[in-house]
Image (tube, rainbow, N blue to C red):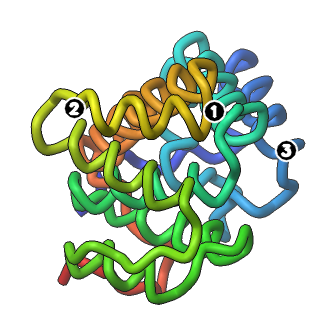
Amino acid sequence: MARLTPLTPDKMNDAQRALFDTIDAARPGARQAADGSLIGPFDAFLRNPNTGAKMLALGSAMRFDSAVPRPAIEVAILCVGRKWEAEFEWWAHVRLALEVGVEQHVIDSILKEEVPNFSDEIQAAVYHGVQELLTNRQLSNGAYDRLKGLIGEDGLLDLFTLVGYYTTISIILNGFRVPLPPGEQNAFG
């Protein structure tokens, strides 16, 4: 059961409303529930607009201004969401992954915790590197060198930051027990 009462626009203070407007401007209506509150981590962000605005900015930078290609970003996010069983994160990013060209069988394999058969070298390297970080809390020299050759040091910083950011998002989602939109099913059972 969700731990937060959805914050509707009529209940927001000025700082919350300003952040709400910023979030809504990015994708009008796409992040809103039927009552006008925000879904996913965005409702939680409103609880502290100072922190929430910084989280929003970092998330946008990681997804839209990264040296890592978008399909590989989505593979990394799915790996983190699966590791944490963050149902909202998984639900939201499966759709985004498909939109940017991640193959369905890759998504299915990540969900089943099986190693996907990648047709894209960068996605494969990102998958293996992220899995090492999530499992071992370290990155082997071989994985580091492979990733550095494919995405550069700037891409490595972006990837490491992305994994940390979406780990934080997973903790926010799980800690507040953020629900899926009505009618959606939890992929983790």
Residue 62 image-quadrant placement: top right
In the rendering, at what x and y percent does residue 65 appear? 77, 32
Determine whether 135 is above or below 117 in the image. above
* Spatial separation of the CA atoms under disc 2 and disc 3: 37 Å
In the rendering, at what x and y percent does residue 142 appear? 29, 36
- Does the CB distance between marks 1 and 3 fall below 8 Å? no
Mark 1 — residue? 62
* Spatial separation of the CA atoms under disc 1 and disc 3: 15 Å
Q: Earlier in the sequence, mark 2 or mark 3?
A: 3
Q: Residues within 10 Å of mark 2 (few under 14, many from 20)?
A: few
- Please identify, in this view, whether the residue under mark 1 or under mark 3 is nearer the observer: 1
Which label number is shown at residue 176? none
Q: Which residue corresponds to the image point at 63% horizontal and 47% vertical from the top-left?
A: 8
Q: In front here: 186 or 176?
A: 186
Q: Residues within 10 Å of mark 3 (few under 14, many from 20)?
A: few
Residue placed furthest toward the left:
136
Which amino acid type corresponds to the residue marked 1 in the rendered image?
Met
Mark 3 residue element:
helix
Q: How many marks?
A: 3
Mark 3 — residue? 26
